[in-house]
Amino acid sequence: MRVGIIGVGWGSVVQVPAFQAVEGFEVVALCSRRPERAAAAAEKLGVPESTTDWESFVRRDDLDVISICTPVDLHREQTLGAIAAGKHVLVEKPVGLDASETAEMLAAAEEAGVRHAVCFEGRYEPSRLAMTDAVRDGMLGTPYLALARSGGDFWHPSRGIQSEWMYRRDAGGGYLMGLASHDIDYLCSLFGVPSAVCADVRTTVARRTRDDGTILEVDADDTSALLIRMADGALASVNTTAVALGESFRSLQLFGSDGSITLDGPMLAADSVPIVVGTPGEPKKEVPPMERPLASNAEIPSRRAAGAIKSLALLLEDWRASFDGADAPDVPTLVDGHRVQQIVDAARLSSDGRGWVTLQ
């Protein structure tokens, strides 16, 4: 399957090496608004071509798959353009600005009959693979409660400013979309479609000073606390912050009638720590991460993003197999991306004063 990737930020850091690690995919072209960035990324990564015109890019006859890895406010138009051209699509999360956009993208993909997937690669982190197996093996019994916590100091006033679009809600910024969405998707993959949401979503630091002394007005969220009623009766709590000074944490605790499962560690190392399981009358024990190898045995680049590259490569490996008729129930699709966006939208409504918001 010949792949074209739009966006060379995360696209070049994670997506290109992930695709290159999976048998059955070939990255043949990159697209970016800035020609010098596109050309430099293509040369560095060994990709034959680069361009700046995404509209003609998605219609190229020599591309089978289009990966959308641009800022969120561009996702809808580019995804719909690729689908209209008959291309299979991989969309970076968050999928869209709101649920009306994600619903339109999902409907278009289903009507066109193209394959679609979303980059919730967190499902494929080694620790979460082990946790998923434990849940599916009945370790929890009847699920009672899930507690997800993630945080860092990315937006603390003591830190420099990130890409400015991330601070704008109308551009798809904020950490509910950018970070909490991974936990929301993962919990839905374990416990099914949620029924209602209650939340507080806030912008704690509303003004940042740029290096030149000008002020950046911030309206995207840096902190959120969600309560989610899962369809199977369990309650989930998802708490996320980007203003935790000096901290980097990511934890997930699951409790049920027959046991408990816990994952706890630094944010960037959560894919390499053991999970801890507990059962009635027995001491807690550690279960190692599930280090699933790639079929290609490709070597993952040794750098900070190595965990994300490997996790995305595993997702792509399962997705590629589905093109040949293999079952791939764990691959997140636009169905999952739309569901997460519905929860995000409900959380914002709740935070604006609606209380518990029922999901349709």
Image (cartoon, grey):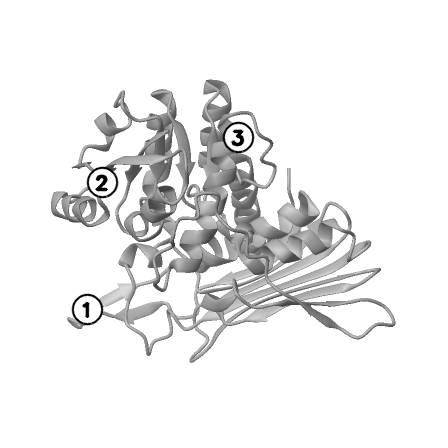
Is disc 3 in contact with disc 1, using a CB cutoff of under 8 Å?
no
Q: Residue at x 71, y 55 (%)?
A: 134
The CA span between labels 2 and 3 is 25 Å
Q: Residue at x 24, y 29 (%)?
A: 57
Above or below, comparing residue 229 to residue 251 in the picture: above
| Residue closest to the eye, 259 or 247 | 259
Q: Amino acid at mark 2?
A: Val
| Residue closest to the eye, 135 or 172 | 135
Element marked by disc 2: loop
The CA span between labels 1 and 2 is 39 Å
Q: Residue 272 in the image: state x and y as whole percent.
A: 52, 65
Left or right relative to 217: residue 34: left
Element marked by disc 3: helix
Q: Which image quarter is the C terminus in? A: top right
Q: Amino acid at mark 3?
A: Ser
The CA span between labels 3 and 1 is 50 Å
Q: Which image quarter is the N terminus in? A: top left
Q: Amino acid at mark 1?
A: Thr
Q: Residue at x 72, y 57 (%)?
A: 235
Tell which tag, 1 or 2, sits nearer the viewer: 2
10 Å neighbourhood of mark 1: few (<14), some, or many (≥20)?
few
Earlier-in-chain disc, 2 versus 3: 2
User: Which of the numbered marks, if any, corresponds to residue 322?
Assistant: 3
Q: Residue 192 in the image: state x and y as whole percent.
A: 68, 44
User: Which of the numbered marks, if any, corresponds to residue 338?
Assistant: none
Which residue, given by chain and number where applicable, does mark 1 sit on? 214
10 Å neighbourhood of mark 3: few (<14), some, or many (≥20)?
some
Q: Residue at x 79, y 63 (%)?
A: 259
